[in-house]
Amino acid sequence: MPQELNGTERMNFNDTMKVLIASIFTLFVISSLTSISNSIFINKAPDVLSNNKIDQIRSELVSTKKSLNYNEKKIPHTVLGRERLIQKMEEQRKVIDSLVHVASIDGARQHLVKLGYTLRNTEIALSHSVLGRDKLIKKIDEQKEDIISFKKIMPSSDLNDNLDLSVGMPLEEIVVDSLEEKKVIDQAPKLTFEEELKLASIDAGAKLSKKCTACHSLNSGGTNRVGPGLWNIVNAPKAKVTGFSYSDSLIALGGNWTVQDLNLWLKSPKKYAPGNAMSFAGLRKTKDRANMVAFLNSISDKPLLNNGLN
């Protein structure tokens, strides 16, 4: 007769069977979800989806997200079947990724625009290519099929009324709208030096100041090097650091190092005082210069309020 299992062995056996059954069930659910996803995007079924099908996808997506959330909380306390659970979670994430752009209005819009960008980039690559043109042409055809397949879904779903940027509008217009929006953002008014200085970061300026340490001392009481010490430099008289020999072009400037003067100097020492011996090319970005001036103001016995702004 077979030997009976003791209590511990029976418990381990039961746990193993539970994990096995749960894994089989999970694989069945994931297989069903994957089948739905494939019917939409991989096989490019010509039949449009009904509202009920969209609702079903959303429901399955919510269910999968809940299950994944539960598993993420469970995994730190799991020893037996840990590898299976990790694999299950990875499969759930793939399912969520494959369906998320169907389950929401914004997701659908973003996905369609993304397909448009991808197609446009491939077409641009083809226009500049000599080798591998056949592969690119094939790729373009596949991408166009993806777009057509996806757009077939949208008019039949309850997303139709809300997808103003995609449904019924040529793909080219969608891409142009997105590009125009990006162009508007890119052309937003740039901040002046004074506006940047109000928002300046001393820490960011301190990082930039590493470019200065080869030639300048930044410490109180520091000695002159190739260039003069920069402690107390903000609002100090120009070309007046004791013990340093200045070029005639700097001596001729006169006045104090106001934050506005420092901005121009840091932008281009050569243009600000032609003929000086400064080898530094300058900081092109207004924000970088503002951060640097804020840092220079901080290395002082009495830093100016508001970084020296009136």
Image: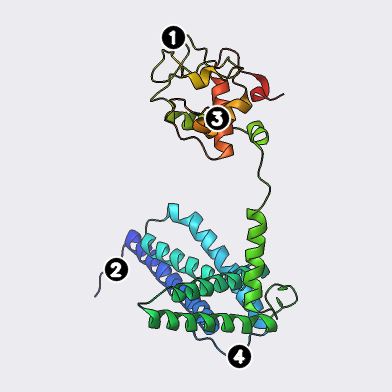
Q: Which residue is mark 2?
A: 4
Secondary structure beneath disc 4?
loop
Q: Earlier in the sequence, mark 2 or mark 4?
A: 2
Q: Earlier in the sequence, mark 4 or mark 3?
A: 4
Amino acid bearing label 1: Gly
Q: Which residue is mark 1?
A: 243
Quadrant of the frame with the C terminus: top right
Horizontal and vertical percent for residue 275?
A: 47, 27
Secondary structure beneath disc 1?
loop
Q: Which residue is mark 3?
A: 272
Q: Residues within 10 Å of mark 3 (few under 14, many from 20)?
A: some
Secondary structure beneath disc 2?
loop
Q: Which residue is mark 4?
A: 47
Q: What is the CA distance from the residue labelled 2 to the residue labelled 4?
A: 57 Å
Q: What is the CA distance from the residue labelled 4 to the residue labelled 3?
A: 70 Å
Q: Earlier in the sequence, mark 2 or mark 3?
A: 2
Horizontal and vertical percent for residue 291?
A: 56, 32
Q: Nearer the viewer, mark 2 or mark 3?
A: 3
Q: Residue 287 bears which disc, if any?
A: none
Q: Nearer the viewer, mark 4 or mark 3?
A: 3
Horizontal and vertical percent for residue 210?
A: 43, 29
Q: What is the CA distance from the residue labelled 2 to the residue labelled 3?
A: 94 Å
